[in-house]
Amino acid sequence: MREGQKKVAESECGKLVKDHKLEKTDEPNGTYIEFLPDNKIFKNYHYIHEYVEQMIQNYTPEYGTHVLLQRQPLRFTERAIF
């Protein structure tokens, strides 16, 4: 979402399957990513939440970033420095 507009793209198996037109939005500027593992590719997967949280924190550019992991907010007390 940027400056009152949003763009949605959907992919499956690494290929773009739907490229939506720009839409108006009241949502704040930012990026939303949803990853749903494909059982054909990711067999018997599971998330290691502590690892996912740390990786997200490592790549989060600033304190004001809002992150949901399985619809639960992650709260970072400090940004990781590496």
Image: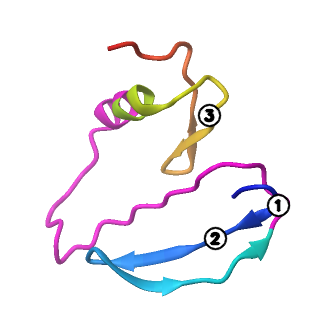
Nearest to the observer: residue 67 or residue 20: 20
- 1 vs 3, front mark: 1
Label 1 sits on what residue type? Gly
Q: Main secondary structure of the magenta part?
A: loop
Reading the image, the residue beneath label 3 is 65
Residue 14 in the image: above or below residue 4: below
Which secondary structure, mark 2?
A: loop
Reading the image, the residue beneath label 2 is 7
Label 2 sits on what residue type? Lys
| Colour setting | rainbow
Which secondary structure, mark 1?
A: loop
- The local crowd at label 1, few if under 14, some if 14 to 19, many if 20 or more residues have their Cα within 10 Å, is few
- The local crowd at label 2, few if under 14, some if 14 to 19, many if 20 or more residues have their Cα within 10 Å, is some
Left or right for 39, reference 56: left
**Residue 60 x, y percent position in the rendering:** 49, 31
- The image quarter in which residue 57 lies: top left
**Residue 17 x, y percent position in the rendering:** 41, 86
Label 3 sits on what residue type? Thr
**Residue 40 x, y percent position in the rendering:** 17, 78
**Residue 18 x, y percent position in the rendering:** 49, 86
Q: Which residues are magenta?
A: 25-54
Residue at image position (34%, 37%) is 52
Reading the image, the residue beneath label 1 is 4
Q: CA distance from mark 1 to mark 3?
A: 18 Å
Q: Of callouts 3 and 2, which one flags the residue occurring earlier in the amino acid sequence?
A: 2
